Image (tube, rainbow, N blue to C red):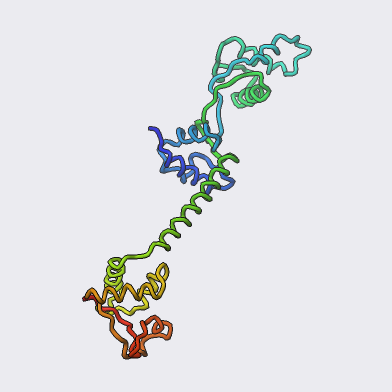
Amino acid sequence: MQPSQLDELKFLLKLQECRNYRAYLTNPCFKSFRAKDKICQNLASDGLVDFSREIVVVKLSAAGQALLKVTDAALPISAVELKLLQKIGTAKKIAPSQLRTSALTATERDVILQTFLNRGLILAETRLKRQKAEVWLTPQGQTCLAELLRQFQTLRQSATEITLNQKPTDTEVLATIQNLDHELASNNYLPIFYLRQKFQPPLSRDELDEILYRLQRNDQIELRAIVHTQDYTPEQLSAAIQTRSNSPLFFIKVI
């Protein structure tokens, strides 16, 4: 099963949450990923993660072949290492499990093979360790996620600005009045300050007043004056539309 790019991104984000950006693949945080091995390989090929590996097959490099031609007295390796290197040289490619010697345990053999690999004496094909495999974010992976977060924040800010700057239509304001009346159970007598909280901004006070006047002229709402003010705060009362008759329009009724 080929993992999706979304799966790979989720894997990176999970790994970022781990201590020192590394974890065993058996960590419960990776339980939901069905193709963990393939995800690791894909991300490693892009340089975003690395993982603990095991050697599958080895062969002598040119440097290793040259070393075997050197006289024993001048060899920079031990007799046990020499014997192991000679065994590698007997085959075109050979698996570590076939390099049996009574002088070495499997663990010691693997350590020597890694030393040979580090010194350039052998070439090796590796794979993700089958047991106790660890995976970690590389510096490139950390940089990639930091840049991704920066871009996300930029896009999020842009989306917020677009939303704030997008002014509602008369129809949208009417629908909001109906929704607020239902949510607040105001019995079709919605105090205007709730609407101002909803639409200022993006609308200015005067712009919202104009929309309400248009809705009233179109017989879609009625603006009602407030008589008893004791149930509201001065701030809430200041949201009313002032009139020449000194009867502030405070309630909105949908017709």
Q: Position of residue 177 (x, y in %)?
A: 29, 72
Q: Is residue 232 above or below residue 15?
A: below
Residue nearest the viewer, comparing 128 with 111: 128
Which quarter of the figure has residue 80? top right
Residue 121 against residue 71 in the figure, above or below:
below
At horizontal 43% and vertical 83% (from top left) the residue drawn is 235
* Residue at point 66%, 18% (across, down): 121
Which quarter shows the N terminus? top left
Res 250 quadrant in image: bottom left
Q: Nearer the viewer, residue 239 or 135?
A: 239
Residue pictured at 51% horizontal, 33% vertical: 131
Residue 221, position as x, y percentages in the image: 25, 76
> Where residue 210 sits in the image (x, y, percent)?
34, 74
Seen at 55% across and 35% down, the residue is 47
Question: Which quarter shows the C terminus?
Answer: bottom left
**233 or 103: nearer the viewer:** 233
